[in-house]
Image (tube, rainbow, N blue to C red):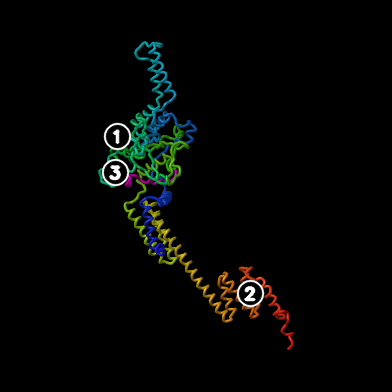
Amino acid sequence: MRKFIFSDILWGMALTLAALFFYFTGTGLETAELKFYDFRARLSAGEPAKSDIAVIEINDDSISKIGRWPWSRSKIADMLVWLSSETAKPSVIGLNILFSEPEKTGDAKLADLLKTKYTELVAQKKIRETGKDSEFLRTLEQAKKSMDNDAKLAEATAAAGNVVLPLIFDTGVPASKPKPEPEWMTKLAPSLSHKSVEGEVSMEGSGITAPIDVLASSAAGVGHVDVFSDMDGEVRREYPYIPYGQNFYPSFAAEVVRVSLGLTPGQVVFTPGSSAVFGKSVMKLDQSSSALIAFNKARPFKYYSFYDVMTGKIVPEAFKDKIVLIGLTAHGVGSLYVTPTDSAMTTVDLTANVVDNILSGRFISRPDWAMPVELGLIIIAGLFTAFVLPRLKAGTGAVLAGGMFAALVTAGMVLFTSRGLWLKIMYPAMVLTAGYIFVITKRFFSTEKKKELIEVSQIETNKMLGLSFQGQGMLDLAFEKFRLCPLDDNMKDTLYNLALDFERKRQYNKAVAVYEHISGRDPEFKDVKNKIDVLKKAADGAVFGGVGGHSAAATPP
């Protein structure tokens, strides 16, 4: 039973089944695979193919000079008016700031209070109006309208004609039936392809946080800015369309691309689980209707401070026919995301990367043949571990297993960096690594066990030979064999008896050598200490005058 449990075939099968379990459940080794994905993503990160994207960032410098955030919407309206000039006119303005509630200023509140109070005083006849229309109320209404920053922003948005605004979907389980989408929103739905594709949309909207109607209805497009992270908390993919109600609605980046290309919503063709087509630009999607983002290096686009633009430090021609994205990058304001290339990527940077990917067609994809190839590699690694590796010498096995591991890693990196193809190679690599460690560990313990058995056999042989030599009176040969044996209690007694034999033959020096050998391990064993002292004196006496101090030459004939 023990032999079966530690058999190479059983452990090879166990490692293979474990890898397959992790593969299909997306647990355990998936984290290691994602970290290796990030490593490859950093290696393949480059510069945008075109410099068509410009970012106007609301950064720390702008906030320190203009004032604390949030600013009056009139300042945003002024930026839109400036960008709408003929010299600056970009192809699209992505205003990534959500205005989900009307702006309430102190002046507007005061105007409402004055209007209410004045109306009460007129009703109480404390103030007399001579005509039907109150000139005071008319003046007050005009003043209030001039202070309506929402209206100013809506007017600037409509005049620009190419502004895209954000919205947010709730994607949790709805507590009740979702509210119907506004009329302006239903016009944003793309054309759905009738192509039969085995795919689905894993994210579905259950609620909406949208811009106020006056702004949304004047915008050229509105898209969701929902960001979804993987199991390790990192953002790697984009969902260009999310279903809500009976329609699919675009992401903010998808709308920026559509407006920049001059397409109507109906001219964008969306095939769930397959692709989203923006004119000549095709965004390939996986079965969950998402796309893996091919991130560029940190801050690869052209960045301009909001304050510098508004104060005339940037020439208008810098934005001519460009894709302009306006967003927050100041510390403590806005959202930050962990991505493979940046541990604190701003929302506007994330949008810029996705827009660049769609226009250039550069995404990371999982080819149709990825799963069968990955499963085949896992099985091959398992078979190699179970049947081939145990039959190889340690050096040969290390070279072959290391070569296979290096080939897997290299192939995964080359396909990712040069072709944008993602193969999950950590699973077969784990089987190879764990299999090699198991085989080598098992071989080591097996060798150690054999070595121990051999050593025990040699000890017994040396002991038996020593006893045989001792019985034949060949004490020197016996001592030589006994010295090769571990000095345990039994061997101490055996050596002690050998030393006594040397004494009987009056070979005191040799007896002392045996006793000192015992004393080196156990000085207190029997009377070896006393024996050593006495026999050393006896040996000296034997040399100069015999035992007891009488010389053999002095004895009379």
Query: Could you say which quadrant of the image residue 268 lies in?
Result: top left
The crowding category of the residue bearing disc 1, from other C-alpha atoms within 10 Å (few below 14, some 14 to 19, many at least 20), is some
In the rendered image, which residue does mark 2 sit on? Answer: 513
- Which residues, given as a range, are shown in magenta? 274-298
Task: Answer above or below: position of 255 versus 511.
Answer: above
As drawn, the residue found furthest toward the front would be 526
The answer to whether one can see residue 187 in this image is yes
Q: Nearer the viewer, mark 2 or mark 3?
A: 2
The crowding category of the residue bearing disc 2, from other C-alpha atoms within 10 Å (few below 14, some 14 to 19, many at least 20), is some
Query: What whole-number distance in Å separates the C-alpha atoms at marks 2 and 3?
Result: 94 Å
Foreground pick, 86 / 349: 349
- Tell me the kind of residue under disc 2: Ala
The C terminus - image quarter: bottom right
Foreground pick, 317 / 515: 515
Mark 2 or mark 3, which has the lower sequence index? 3
Specify whether residue 288 is painted magenta: yes
Q: Which mark is residue 271?
A: 3
- Tell me the kind of residue under disc 1: Lys
The answer to whether one can see residue 43 in this image is no
Secondary structure beneath label 3: strand
Mark 1 or mark 2, which has the lower sequence index? 1
Give x and y (percent) for residue 230: 39, 45
Q: Nearer the viewer, mark 1 or mark 2?
A: 2
Mark 3 or mark 1, which has the lower sequence index? 1
- Figure disc tally: 3
As drawn, the residue found furthest toward the bottom would be 557
In the rendered image, which residue does mark 1 sit on? Answer: 187
Give x and y (percent) for residue 510: 63, 77
Give x and y (percent) for residue 323: 38, 38
